[in-house]
Image (tube, grey):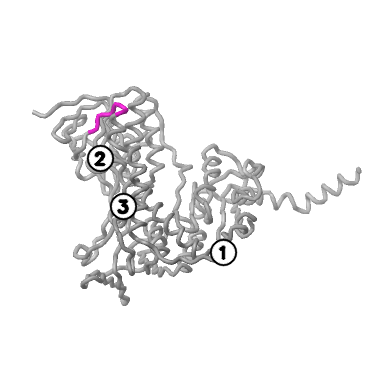
Amino acid sequence: MSEIIKTDICVIGGGSGGLSVAAGASQMGAKVVLIEKAKMGGDCLNYGCVPSKALLGAAHAAQHVREAGTFGTDATLNAIDPQKVHDYVHGVINGIAPHDSVERFEGMGVQVIQGAARFIGPQTLSADGKTVQAKRFVIATGSRPFIPPIDGLDDVDYLTNETIFNLTETPKHLIILGGGPIGIEMAQAHRQLGADVTILIRSHMMPKDDPELVDFVRTRLQQDGIHIVEQTSVENITQLNDEIVVKTGDEIYTGSHLLVATGRQVNADSLDLEAANVAYDNHGIRIDERLRTSNKKIFAIGDVTGGLQFTHKAGYDAGIIIRNALFRLPAKADYNALPWVTYCEPELASVGLNEDAARKEHDEIRILRWPFSENDRARTEGKTHGLIKVITTKKGRILGASIVGPSAGELIQVWVLAIGQKLKIGAIASMITPYPTLGEVSKRAAGSFFTPSLFSEKTKKFVRFLLRFG
């Protein structure tokens, strides 16, 4: 007979969202069981955010050496050691791993079960030979790479984000299927580390971002020497010895390595959710605004719910679940101020509505722009390729902002705050920014909202009138 464990909260999945719930609930006095069948830290630590940004860090360092001559510095990039790059990436992972480890969570009082979970009832599941009964469950099982049904793909040695960081050699020619954030970041990283790179995209690159700002990224990638093919469909893939051959219509692309980055698939199919009366489909587990599933005792968080799949969203969701599950407060998720960033050079960051979405929701909008070429700090550092674009109502309510340029992921945060706190554009325009900083692009863009009225003929007449009195 299996061991029966009774607990307050049972979290399934040791990724970002699940760990946040487990840590918060345990430290607030709840009895918590955490179940993870693979690596603690989930996709973000082991295969996603952390290794990809570490690899990009190494790649950008190499590129900065190549570009050092712009500043009058005589520098030569003699060689790139792919083994050392691999070791650096995994060193970063290993440095963060203790924070997400079994030992740390057991030290908090969390009971960690390492095994696969499956529901055997509405409030009961089985894992590693144990039966867990909980007052509340949280499903945080994340997602995995989606592998498209392309003829011949199953017969070739392809890479995904779960395997590409294990390479200890630089690909001679990396072919990438997919033009989303993973594909774009990996394309630039490997190109700057010395690989030839071709990106094959079914529609357009970075389709969730503003096309005007995506153009800046596309131009930079092409300047780096990356071959981008958009609106193409892969017919079949074959492997001939050490070469992978990809056929698209009348074109044939031959590479040494193939990365499949065509989206994500939720990890919900092995949980026996039917036994728990939890509704789901291929897009994810269905949840309400309080992140409850069709079984109100079971919550779902992060990638497994579909939609926007970001680590910071999972962390935000954890707070919503803590308030609902522990404090019985009817907290609802609000993603109006949820930002997202693609970490290439230049970075592209967004929050709120883009221009197309804003036009669909509002009869009249204002579009504010300010180029990095007009920013003095950007000029001093030779990073003038970029633009900030802000969308407001005609009365100045901020609807969205997008930034493409250096440190865009940092610069977007003031707009996240503004949208989240429902500030009007005047709050950003009146902000005192230190000089010279990249952050001035936000103030300049906001200030341009008032330019038509501030420097209008009506204002000039009024000023001349006042000056008559001395």
Percent across and percent down for residue 341 are 45, 51
Q: Which x, y percent locates residue 368?
A: 60, 53
Residue that label 2 marks: 279
Residue at horizontal 33 percent and vertical 26 percent from the top:
26
Give whichever of discs 3 and 1 has the lower sequence position.
1
Amino acid tagged 3: Arg
Q: Nearer the viewer, residue 135 or 145?
A: 145
**As drawn, 11 above or below 435:** above
Q: Nearer the viewer, mark 3 or mark 1?
A: 1
Magenta residues? 107-112
Residue type for callout 1: Thr
> Is residue 147 in view?
yes
**Lateral position of residue 145 relative to residue 221, left or right:** left
Does residue 28 sit above or below 205 in this rendering?
above
- Horizontal relation, residue 154 to residue 361: left or right: left
| Label drawn at residue 73 | 1
**Mark carried by residue 433:** none
- Determine whether 364 is above or below 217 in the image: above
Residue 215 within the magenta-colored segment of the rendering: no
Identify residue for label 3.
264
Magenta span contains residue 110: yes
Q: Secondary structure at mark 2?
A: loop
